[in-house]
Amino acid sequence: MASVGQKNLRETSVVTLLLATCLSSAALAESIKEYRYTVGPSANISVDTQYGAISVRSGSGNQVVVTATLKSDSVEVDHQQTGNRIEIASHLLQGANEQTGRVDYEVLIPPDATLSLRSSTGPLSAERLHGDLTLEGTDAVVNVRNVENGHVHVRTMRGPITLTDVHNGHVEIASISGDVHLTSVTGPFVQANSGSGKIFYDGDFGSGGDYKFSTHTGDIEALAPADVSADFSAHSMLGRVQNDFKLQPRHSRFSVEEGRSFFGTVGKAASKVVLRSFSGRIRLKQR
Amino acid sequence: MTCSDVQRVLPEILDGGPDARLAPEFKTHVQSCPDCSDLVSDLKLITSEARQLAATEEPSPSVWLGIAAQLRAEGLVNDALIHEPESLKTSVDTSAAPRPILVPSAPRRRWSTWWLAPVAAGLVAAGSYVVSHKPAPQMAKQQAPATPGPSASPTSSEETPTVTVAPAPAPASQVAEKSAPPTPPRHVVAPAEELAPSDEDQQFLSVVSTRAPSMRATYESQLKAVNADIRETQAYVNQNPGDVDARQHLMDAYQQKALLYQIALDRIQ
């Protein structure tokens, strides 16, 4: 009797296990969907997902190709083209969570398209584009690379932001606590603000641009070549400042406070650079 | 009268032009509908606070334009003229320009989170007011002697706003302006006391708890951080009212809080 009971129990366990596996597989069934659109010049494309990565690169011609990987059937993709405007959005169904509601997007767009990306979790990435870009994420890691001539607006709550090789753009970055890392970023207007995140800049500050970096508690570090041409202003209310350059004095409405501020020009002062922090440390380093 | 009707006529009612025929219906509905009642209370509070701000110093037009742009982007207001009930139309229309109206929520946006937008806007406006409000009479006491360093122009003729405060950290390996004269006396910033969350913050967290419970702790900690930044900077500005940079930092701190509200608004609807 005991052996029969054990056998029944074993069989029941196996069936239950198989059933559970099937059910969970069904619930987490990953699927891939592809959408293709034809657009005209300067199309407007937006991709919005609560959970998941969005990666955008320039494609060829006037085609927009969206590949969406849905992690389960607890989420759908709503997509719509209205003329030259395309809207893609994840649509969470009842009971979806961060795992089951995740949709990862890979998108190819014409390089001149205006792009808007939003994801809470990210990561978000955009590269080889020259239209206007807006990227927003709560915790999303944001990467923008090889972008020129467009506006680049990024905002996150905690997600770190990295811009690399962004030129001739109007760049505005805001984060509450995310770090901001800018490498070879130049343009007529480059502004980054983070509350407690750090801001790091490595570049030559271009020629004729207006650069403003500010934090509350985060440190600011700027690394520039010896032949940089800029008018620098740096001030930390409660933190320290450090400067490797030999700055030429200039008239300023502010006075220098030792260790907490410095002002002056290098070269022909082509660009204006303002570094401000409430209590973070500011360093201007020579490469 | 439905909730939608209330939202449509609310701006008129709040502007002090209640229609005689609609007022009883409006009042009856608001008394029976908690959502509309909360909405009216919130808007009255915001309107009242905004009037107080306007009475002292108006933020720059760019602030309002930014707020309007944000509200339009969120679809919360529409510049198109609404089809007003005949009873709401006055015999003499003195305003040629169309008035922005509240747009009823989209069907899938079932939760009343739109109030976050005006609250965020209010934060920016409040920050703008605080930054632009200058208690000039105290400046003389706060100002320290100018201390021009070698890389700064000694010819600056303007009065130097007082700088800082607080125990200085250990000097960096190479600080700027090594040969500058000693730093003038500093005012120490009192540590920012942690205050109880405001009604708006509590409402904000309540909505987050309902719509995105997993994010509650995150938003709460971020909110505490930005509030602490505001208090810290405000304390500094109070002690150094002539410090232009400090005022800018205070504005930044308010904008950080507005950013937090906006991010929440985007994500939890």
Image (cartoon, rainbow, N blue to C red):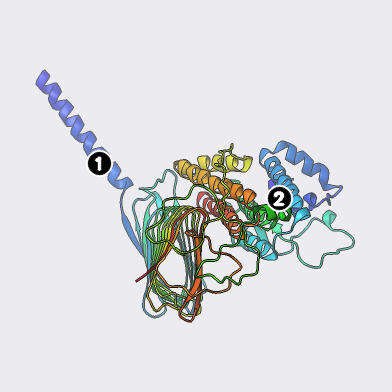
The C terminus of chain A sits in image quarter: bottom left
Q: Quadrant of residue B246?
A: bottom right
Tell me the number on the disc at residue B7: 2
Q: Is residue B95 left or right of residue A177?
A: right
Position of residue A282 measured from the top left corner of the image (x, y, whole percent): 44, 60
Q: Amino acid at mark 2?
A: Gln
Depth check: give the residue in front, B122 or B227: B227
Q: Residues within 10 Å of mark 1 (few under 14, many from 20)?
A: few
Q: Amino acid at mark 1?
A: Thr
**Image depth: mark 1 or mark 2 in front:** 2
Q: Quadrant of residue A117?
A: bottom left
Q: Is residue B247 left or right of residue A224?
A: right
* Tag 2 subunit: B
Query: How many discs appear?
Result: 2
* Tag 1 subunit: A
Q: Is residue A213 left or right of residue A226?
A: right
Element type at marker 1?
A: helix
Q: Quadrant of residue B35?
A: top right
Q: Residue furthest right?
A: B91
Element type at marker 2?
A: helix
Position of residue B206 measured from the top left corner of the image (x, y, whole percent): 55, 39
Residue at numbered disc 1: A21
Q: Mark 1 to mark 2: distance in Å?
A: 50 Å
Callouts 1 and 2 on one subunit? no
Q: Is residue A204 left or right of residue B107?
A: left
